[in-house]
Image: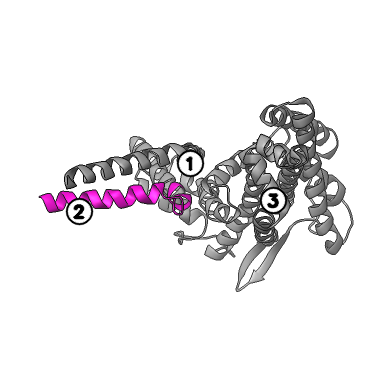
Amino acid sequence: MKERAKKKKSILMIFWDFLSNDKTSSIAIPFVSIILSLIVAAILLIALGKNPIEAFASFIKGCGFLPKPSYASGKGMITDIFSFLGIMAPMLIASIGVVIAMRANLFNIGVSGQMLASGFIATVIVGYSDLSPFIAKPVAVLIGIVVGGLLGIFVGVLKYKFNIHEVVSTIIINYIISLVTAFFINSYYADPVTRTTRRCSNAARLMLSDINIGGYSISIPLGIIIAVVAVIGIKIFLEKTVLGFELKNVGLNKECSRYAGVNVNKSILVAMGLSGAFAGLAGVTYYLGYYNTIYPNELSSMGYDCIAVALLGNNNPIGCIFASFLITILQAGSVYMSSTIGVSKEIASVITGIILLFSACGGFLIYVAKRQKNKWNDSEKEAMK
């Protein structure tokens, strides 16, 4: 019995060390957050009278990583996977925007508004034009970066010039953008049947639609290529450049950074400008990529889901790849899950919220792990006396 108890204690010690160690905590906290979230989600599903294993499997089937019982003509697992990549791309890009702001200890909750403004302006300027694909697609990307970047810089100016907290200003700007775009959509650009914006030309879309490969009609998202390039570029920027180092220092301690000669106001503008630029880039890959229309008076929930991705990815661009993969499975697979097991698709947002909650408690989990580890060490010392 003593050997068994000792073995059990040593396993727990390894677990606490895994959580509290500075080298492994960046992996451990997201992993534990996901496990705890899935356990809570399973309890919720059981309470609703559903099989959690079947529910989780249906999420995966809806994204193309497990086969469905049947498919429509020209559709298959491969088409579902490409569709999944199409929605994952803007999620990943938007989460990088959140990461950049958080590195400077700023919280860009205006991603959804920046996405909408960029997507709408790109749609109006490029989506309804007669430009060739080789001009229209790069121009749409450029518009997304510029519009989102300008909105981010505006929030940064409000922050350092008038000391208006970025959370307050971005929430207000979100509502303004939603109402203004709704006015223009309803007045000038609405489809008379759907009441959404008219569809963009294929030349402007960041999607190669209806490509026939092996008998399957596949839509290839160009956004996933943009997302991969963005991850690599921002990783190098944050880890290898002076400006990236300054953003990190400002995020850790503004006063020490100012004393060391860092231009804090400039860092705030750069952080919010880059954050907005990536949000705008996510907007054009979302509204001119995965979707082809914009609903008036509707902000994309992705602007908030990407915050969960950033936290789950431990504010690291590489971590965001894996985090966006998981969160996108929940969001993209929710429709199929709802249709197969009869649970409202909003359960996906509930699970995302639970993941966000546990991810935000990362510091507390590390504290508990260190305390348990210290207790174990103290008891070992007492036993040796």
Q: Residue furthest right?
A: 130
Question: Residue tagged by mark 2?
Answer: 7
Q: Is residue 179 visible?
A: no
Q: Residue 262: percent from the left, percent from the top?
A: 74, 42
- State the count of labels: 3
Q: Label 3, label 1: how many angstroms apart (C-alpha)?
A: 24 Å
The Cα–Cα distance between marks 1 and 2, rounded to whole angstroms, is: 29 Å
Q: Main secondary structure of the magenta part?
A: helix
Cβ–Cβ under 8 Å for marks 1 and 2: no
Answer few, some or many: residues within 10 Å of disc 1's Cα (few below 14, many 20 plus, some between 14 and 19).
many
Task: Give the number of the mark in front: 3 or 1.
Answer: 3
Q: Amino acid at mark 2?
A: Lys
Residue 162 image position (x, y, % from top left):
78, 25
Q: Secondary structure at mark 3?
A: helix
Range covered by the magenta-colored residues = 1-29
In which quarter of the view is residue 119 placed? Answer: top right
Disc 3 marks which amino acid? Gly
Q: Secondary structure at mark 2?
A: helix
Give the position of the C terminus as an image quadrant: top left
Q: Position of residue 57 (x, y in %)?
A: 41, 53
| 137 over 54 or under it: above or below | below
CB atoms at circles 2 and 3 under 8 Å apart?
no
Q: Which mark is first along the chain, 1 or 3? A: 3
- Which residue occupies the foreground of this view, 201 or 146? 146
- Local crowd at mark 2 within 10 Å, few (<14), some, or many (≥20)? few
Query: How many residues crowd mark 3 within 10 Å: few (<14), some (14–19), many (20+)?
Result: many
Give residue 359's mark.
1
Residue pointed to by mark 3: 244
x and y percentages locating residue 319 in the rendered image = 55, 54
Would you say residue 186 sits in the magenta stretch? no
